[in-house]
Amino acid sequence: MADYTELLARITERARDDEPTTPLAAGLPAPLREQTINSAEDRLGFALHPLLATIYRDFANGGFGPDEQLFSLTDGPTSEQAVECYLRARARYAGTEWAWPEGVLPILTWGCGMYAGVDCRSEQGTVLLFEPNPGDPDAAWWIDSPSLAAWFEHYVDDTGWWVKAETGEDFDEMAPWPDARARAAT
């Protein structure tokens, strides 16, 4: 099992720096008990990526991170919960060309229907961007970051595409996620 101690320390420092600008002025939400995470995984039908489980268990139940903030896994202070968002998306679009891929847990919204999601079936926890606004389901899924750890590094270091986009800076094009269609069919 990977050791995320150093990354968690960096996330903690960054989240504390961000806290005065968030609606969570009283502090971050409490971490979740292992049983709560296990129950969430049972409802989802898959295990969380180990880093994501560590974040929810050892750090906080969402409420920090880039832009709109990481979703709570289950009941919590954020307006959306990851488990409910996933189950809703899977049910709503099942059998359509917009079907939500199995094992991709939405972790935050960028607004306008766009989500960041973690591919919990990939060893690295690839972070994907769902961008439906051009209207083409075959071009709606992009690789945001090859791993969840790298995505959190971008958050900590202010180097994510979202920072560049906010400042009007050009950023590298994201590669399409080649597994989108096959995974949506499962």
Image (spheres, rainbow, N blue to C red):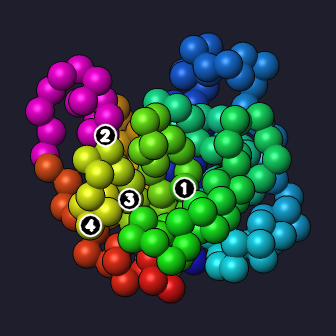
Task: Answer yes or no: is residue 171 visible.
Answer: yes
Q: Which residue is mark 4?
A: 138
Secondary structure beneath dot 2 equals loop
Q: Residue sitting at 79 percent across and 41 percent down?
A: 76
The image shows residue 126 at horizontal and vertical percentages of 39, 66
- Front tag of 3 and 2: 3
The image shows residue 165 at horizontal and vertical percentages of 24, 30
The image shows residue 77 at horizontal and vertical percentages of 77, 34
- Front tag of 1 and 2: 1
Measured Cα–Cα span from mark 3 to mark 2 = 13 Å
Measured Cα–Cα span from mark 4 to mark 3 = 14 Å
Amino acid type, callout 2 = Gly
Measured Cα–Cα span from mark 1 to mark 4 = 19 Å
| Residue range (magenta) | 159-172
Measured Cα–Cα span from mark 1 to mark 2 = 17 Å
Q: Tell which circle, 3 or 2, labels the residue nearer the N-terminal end.
A: 3
- Front tag of 4 and 2: 4
Q: Residue sitting at 43 percent across and 36 percent down?
A: 112
Q: Residue sitting at 67 percent across and 64 percent down?
A: 87
Q: In this rendering, would 156 be left or right of 11?
A: left
Amino acid type, callout 4 = Asp
Q: Is residue 126 above or below residue 110?
A: below
Measured Cα–Cα span from mark 1 to mark 3 = 9 Å
- Pointers 4 and 3 in contact (CB under 8 A)? no
- Pointers 1 and 3 in contact (CB under 8 A)? no
Q: Which residue is mark 2?
A: 160
Q: Residue sitting at 56 percent across and 51 percent down?
A: 107
Label annotation for residue 106: 1
The image shows residue 145 at horizontal and vertical percentages of 32, 57
